[in-house]
Amino acid sequence: MTDDTTLDKRSAVLQSTLTLIVERGFHNTPMSLIAKEAGVSAGIIYHYFANKDDLIHQLYKDVKAQLGTAIMSDDLHDLPMREQVKRVWLRSFRFYADHPQEMRFIEQYENSPYYVPVERGDYDPNMQELFALFEAGYEAGLLKPLPAAVMQALTFGVAVSLAKQHHAGSEHFDQQTIDLVAETVCEAILA
Amino acid sequence: MTDDTTLDKRSAVLQSTLTLIVERGFHNTPMSLIAKEAGVSAGIIYHYFANKDDLIHQLYKDVKAQLGTAIMSDDLHDLPMREQVKRVWLRSFRFYADHPQEMRFIEQYENSPYYVPVERGDYDPNMQELFALFEAGYEAGLLKPLPAAVMQALTFGVAVSLAKQHHAGSEHFDQQTIDLVAETVCEAILA
DNA sequence: TATAATCGAATGAACGTTCAATTGGTCAGC
DNA sequence: GCTGACCAATTGAACGTTCATTCGATTATA
């Protein structure tokens, strides 16, 4: 009973879907349980979502948009490239570290058959901005001439992996260590 | 019908479970379909596995062991640390790149509630050897003094992320690019 | 002949989805 | 300000299906 029932029920449904799927997986999370946890009836879910898959897809979009906002919130223009990269990296790590449920849901979704890699145009606006940043850096010769996928692996791949261990493990990383990784990542991709 | 029925049925079941779960997810992969695809009866699965969860857990152990073998197969001792790291990294990437199903299954499993992070002792012997390699390098001062989790993120995190995009994307990476990433990863963690 | 392997129909529970019925709110016309 | 008409929101029991698992019978193996 994650009681936001006073707010709108659609949000309550999304919220309890998030919590339950992270804890129990896609299977093993019946609609009836989502409804109970959200404090609504089973039927109402179908008023807001076409079906279970639609609910899951919409939740993913929602969470991914949160991530986009967290990373690209304020503008980075007129900062040097190195600083831009560092900040973006730190924010992505921070989002993952501070939002374990959201992170786990994203990962669970993206590694399941639910996920169909999207066209560039389908991305969240903030994410598009992010790609633009990298592209600009690349064309200005400030970044190493590496394929975009390699860039992503060397930056966000590291952030995701690190955050996973952050949550899984007893180990917690102090800010100094995180900073060091951010620097290392910059080193890896800056020309 | 991935016909290895002439071999033992247990393997046939594991194989079709792998294929089907990668394509359809844990849910949406009924035992009956696994049986059909393996060319065996539904009942026989319960002769070899306690239940569906057990089947999935055993498949994971199996695949993870394959990965361990692929990475640590021959011995690396008396190679310089840099070369050891580079080879291990390249092999892990190669395994993922060459075994899309196995990779996807590992990722799907590890990002689902099936996965309960294990104690050190539970790891595959080859994986343990891998940890030992890093530990030795660390204690000899050949690697940067970073937490083990950071080391993993900077190496395998990158490999996994890169391999995912390798499979998802149109983009394919030539050996030269892969080599460059391997070098970059070494740079990132070597003292 | 005893034991292991194998079959596949039967079972019963769980689950996604539907729907007829109820409530609540909005607002036009009086 | 009241009425009633309309539509959105909401309920939860009921439906039909799917699925994991069981088990008695059958076949192969030793």
Image (cartoon, coloured by chain):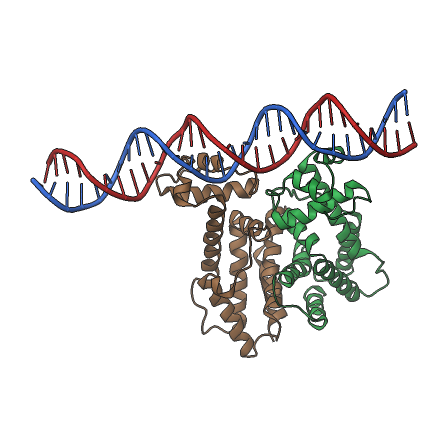
Chain colours: A brown, B green, C blue, D red
Q: Is residue B131 left or right of residue A123?
A: right
In the image, residue B19 above or below residue A68: above
Q: Is residue B153 left or right of residue C5?
A: left
Give the residue at x 70% y 58%.
B96
Decide which of B55, A178 is in the foreground and name it. B55
Can residue B80 be seen at all in this image of the molecule? yes
In which quadrant of the rendered image does the N terminus of chain A lie?
top left
Residue B10 position in % (x across, y down): 77, 40
Q: In the rendered image, which quarter is residue B78 located in?
A: bottom right
Residue A121 position in % (x across, y down): 48, 65
Give the residue at x 64% y 51%.
B107
In the image, residue D1 above or below residue A173: above
Q: In the rendered image, which quarter is residue A189 located in?
A: bottom right
Decide which of B121, A34 is in the foreground and name it. A34
Can residue B50 be seen at all in this image of the molecule? no
In which quadrant of the rendered image does the C terminus of chain A lie?
bottom right
Which residue lies most toward the bottom here? A140
Give the residue at x 59% y 43%.
B28
The number of numbered discs placed on residues in the rendered structure image is 0
Q: Is residue A33 left or right of residue B109?
A: left
Q: In the rendered image, which quarter is residue B163 located in?
A: bottom right
Residue B75 position in % (x across, y down): 85, 58
Decide which of B111, B11 is in the foreground and name it. B11
Give the residue at x 75% y 53%.
B67
Q: Is residue D29 left or right of residue A149?
A: right
Residue A79 position in % (x across, y down): 47, 72
In the image, residue B166 above or below residue B11: below
